[in-house]
């Protein structure tokens, strides 16, 4: 049975893999990290391309099942460990909104943010997969008002994905830090799981940087 199989998270600190690790912490299941030093380009080496041919993290292996793409990983793990209560069940009325928000992250928010990062001219409403940045961000703000979570009073795995995505995108000025987003991020950032993983990420980033400097010195 997949559930009792070992879990390996292919990981790099301060990346989209951070959220997948936070989720594993929230699910309270044992896992092993396979850390890639992305500053040294390990994600583009054949060993990792055999795991994810796109060379992107996160990827998670549970027994013989391999899952890539952060939203797919959240969906998979939160359902696999449903007893943690982070995923509404298939017949739960909240299931639709839950799945919808997981998919909006990858299908709409990510391309919208990349377009802004690359300073692309806004395309017509029918040429993008997200209509317009404004309509998408307004939709998110409405979903978080009054909150406290995307599903109202109910906290779910989708909040981990969105809380962390907003943390990075507001920090880089790609998404405006509207009051509803600030309150949401503050709520999420108070969670022990996020604080633990963030602290360990900072230490790991410093180690990776030092390793790269060391190898440059060694020539
Ligand atoms: N579509 C992927 C994107 C993952 C992604 O962009 N990961 C970045 C880190 S935040 C990465 O692995 N970059 C390494 C590279 O492109 O070299 C997902 O949602 O999981």
Image (cartoon, rainbow, N blue to C red):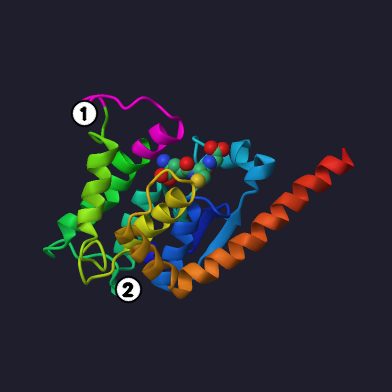
Callout 1 secondary element? loop
Q: CA distance from mark 1 to mark 2?
A: 39 Å
Residue sitting at x 33%, y 43% = 109
User: What range of the chain is rendered magenta?
Assistant: 112-127
Q: Residue furthest front?
A: 179
Crowdedness of circle 2 by 10 Å Cα count: few (<14), some, many (20+)?
some
Report the disc number at residue 125: 1
Q: Residue 166 at x, y = what percent?
A: 39, 53
Which is more toward the observer, 111 or 100?
111
- Whichever of labels 1 and 2 marks the residue nearer the N terminus, that label is 2
Which is more toward the observer, 66 or 159?
159
Q: Is residue 188 above or below residue 18?
A: below
> Where, quadrant-wise, is the N terminus in this rendering?
bottom left
Residue sitting at x 59%, y 41% = 43
Q: Residue 119 at x, y = what percent?
A: 43, 29
Identify the image quadrant of residue 108.
top left
Magenta span contains residue 116: yes
Q: Nearer the viewer, mark 1 or mark 2?
A: 1
Would residue 214 be seen by someone viewing this image from the given angle? yes
Residue sitting at x 44%, y 68% = 189
Q: Is residue 13 above or below residue 54?
A: below
Mark 1 C-beta to ligand 1 under 8 Å: no
Q: Residue 23 at x, y = what percent?
A: 41, 64
Secondary structure mainly formed by the magenta segment: loop
Which is more toward the observer, 182 or 155?
182
Look at mark 2 in the image and give the residue it sits on: 84
Residue sitting at x 60%, y 65% = 200
């Amino acid at each position: 049975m997949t559930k009792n199989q070992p879990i390996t998270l292919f990981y790099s600190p301060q990346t989209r893999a951070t959220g997948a690790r936070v989720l594993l912490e929230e699910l309270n299941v044992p896992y092993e990290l396979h850390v890639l030093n992305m500053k040294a380009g390990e994600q583009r080496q054949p060993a990792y391309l055999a795991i994810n041919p796109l060379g992107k993290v996160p990827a998670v292996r549970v027994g013989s099942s391999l899952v890539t793409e952060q939203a797919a990983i959240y969906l998979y793990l939160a359902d696999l460990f449903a007893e943690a209560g982070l995923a509404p069940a298939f017949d739960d009325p909240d299931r639709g909104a839950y799945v919808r928000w997981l998919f909006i992250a990858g299908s709409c928010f990510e391309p919208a943010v990349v377009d802004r990062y690359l300073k692309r001219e806004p395309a017509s409403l029918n040429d993008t997969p997200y209509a317009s940045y404004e309509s998408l961000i307004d939709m998110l703000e409405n979903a978080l008002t009054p909150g406290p979570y995307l599903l109202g009073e109910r906290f779910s795995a989708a909040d981990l994905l969105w809380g962390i995505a907003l943390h990075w995108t507001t920090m880089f000025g790609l998404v405006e830090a509207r009051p509803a987003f600030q309150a949401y991020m503050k709520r999420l950032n108070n969670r022990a799981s996020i604080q633990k993983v963030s602290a360990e990420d900072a230490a790991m980033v410093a180690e990776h940087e030092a390793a790269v400097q060391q190898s440059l010195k060694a020539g």
